[in-house]
Image: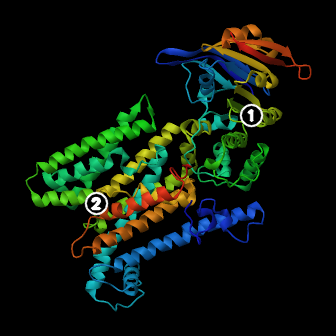
Amino acid sequence: MRIRLSNWPGRFTRNGFKLVSGIGSGPQVNRKQVVSSRFTLLITVLLPAAVILSIVGAVSVGSVTIKFNETWKIIINHLLPWYQPFDQTWRTATEKIVWDLRLPRVLLGGTVGGILSVAGVAIQASVRNPLAGPYILGISSSAATGAVSVMLLGAFRFLGNFALSIGAFIGAMLGMFMVITIANVKGRVTPVRIVLTGVAISAFFSAVTNFIVHSAKNDEGVRSALFWMIGSFAGARWEYWPLPAVGLILSVVMFMALSRALNAMILGDETAVTLGVNIQTLRMVTVITAALITGLGVAVSGAIAFVGLVVPHVVRVFTGADHKRVLPISLFVGAVYLIWADVLARIIVAPEELSIGIITSLLGAPFFVYLLRKSRYSFGGKSS
Amino acid sequence: MKCTVNGITWKADGKSIISDIHIEAERGSFIGILGTNGSGKTTLLKNIYRVLKPHQGTIFIDDHNLVSISNRQSAREMAVVSQEDNAEFDFSVLEVVLMGRYPHKKMFESDTENDKDIARQAIEKVGLQGFDERRFISLSGGEKQRTLIARALTQQAELLILDEPTNHLDIGFKLKIFDIVKQLDLTIIAAIHDLNLAALYCDKIYILNGGRVHATGSPVEVINERLLGDLFGVKADIQVHPFTGKPQVYFTGAV
């Protein structure tokens, strides 16, 4: 049994070549070219279009519904401030909701979705373990410690709006630094050591976080600390967006440049070395980059569960394990996924909000189980 | 391409696993490394293909000291088929074989038709034509091994290191794989368990025992009844085959 989407381009179903009808009899080269041009179309047109539509769609949905037609005009007017192609037919309040409140939140959601997915792909490759995710280095727990220190103990108060993010980011980096230092024995970092050290560091920081939360007198503060720990975009502001976005773009470019090396790495350390990969350097660079962008994401949204683990798996079912395909597709799929998950978080119990981590786990867990049962699949395909 | 191993020693926890090993692999020669389980064959090969760093001694490929060139550079000169088997990934056969082009590619460079031709020729050489798009994980043990051999050929290196390359293959493919690599005019260093196979293909054999070179020479020189009794604990009768002129071992029991 395998997953199939009947209208999916040939290459993206497993064993999917037969699905490309009418060209099966042609020479190999033509078939390959058709497939690679479909892939190019997918990542340069179709998926970016899906992301843009999702952004405009998600901005339109909410406690005040805004016409799709108005939403994109407002956005374009803002993007071209000197040109202003559309006459204002909407109320100024609408414009404020779109540009000041919802768009930064949606963009941040998409960016963090991309970050978690790309970091998930990178971490799974570097520790060669399908159970790994971006939080394997203890980042979620250590960032939470940083965040609750800010919220409940008042650390970094002088940083104003950025105190929480900076506290969380410092926590995340501290966790990563500890894992990498401890996992490094005589200049060698092995996948198993990274995973086990990450587990230990996670447990340690969780304990510290719990201690801070339990000894807090301030009920409101405890509530918002818990809310943060499950993840939310409720506090999104424009200022939070550029750094994670730039981090994401740079890391995607870098990982794409390393995609061959990442492929070699999941074949095994020995194989990678014999193919000419400098495996220790590659692993360090990959892990640190993934941790950095995850830290940037967690700093602005809390530790959203089950995105970085699930998205790469889902994508691999359709693309196979080649990182040249897995990385860009995960980026877009993760972005679209979190954008809509955040919409659900906003509307399900409106006017209250759910934490987005609840949505991603509630949706992600059953879907993941379904995938595991449905396809002959572990790290993108071991027969069971 | 000539490969010279100069007195290498490798230790685990202070204990020598191999010590003071010298090997000379002349250009185009087929060198067999034989020995019992645990005699250090794999450790020796891992030192040569840079997964382990020798504690003493040097390894030269032509006149490059291995420690002075990058992994990438050595991967262009030396290809490896090892025993590592990580089947938990979903690549097609062509994708796995194309990874052999890695040391020849720059960062953003994509695979050209030329790369694909090289890969397809290698796939054909190991008898896997038509398998391009098959998933690697769905292959049988022998097909996987042939895929990995095709990947090594795709590297277009002149030195080929083989660690028990044919242990999953039936006799037909065993002979076929050795025939293929032998006719490619490569320098080959191979750990081989099957004595008769080693005798048939190797120009020179090194017998390892307890991490040291126990005997060196042509198959006829080193494969003899006493050695088999001493090292492997087997009783054997050895005849020189009339057609091949190579020694043929007939086992008659354990000592």
Amino acid type at image mark 1: Glu
Horizontal and vertical percent for residue A380?
Answer: 53, 53
Q: Which sits in the foreground, B241 or A104?
A: B241
Q: Is residue B242 left or right of residue B90?
A: right
Amino acid type at image mark 2: Gly
Is B235 located above or below residue A102 in the figure? above
The number of discs equals: 2
Element class at badge 2: loop
Is B231 located above or below residue A195 in the figure? above
The answer to whether any part of residue A144 appears in the image is yes
Horizontal and vertical percent for residue A5?
Answer: 56, 68
- Disc 1 crowd rating (10 Å Cα; few below 14, some 14-19, many 20+) is many
Image disc number at residue A231 = 2
The answer to whether any part of residue B104 appears in the image is no
Q: Is residue B19 left or right of residue A176?
A: right
Q: Which sits in the foreground, A357 or B6?
A: A357
- Disc 2 crowd rating (10 Å Cα; few below 14, some 14-19, many 20+) is many
What subunit carries mark 2?
A
Residue pushed farthest front?
B253
Q: Which residue is under mark 1?
A: B158
Is B33 located above or below residue A234 in the figure? above
What subunit carries mark 1?
B
Horizontal and vertical percent for residue A209?
Answer: 20, 47
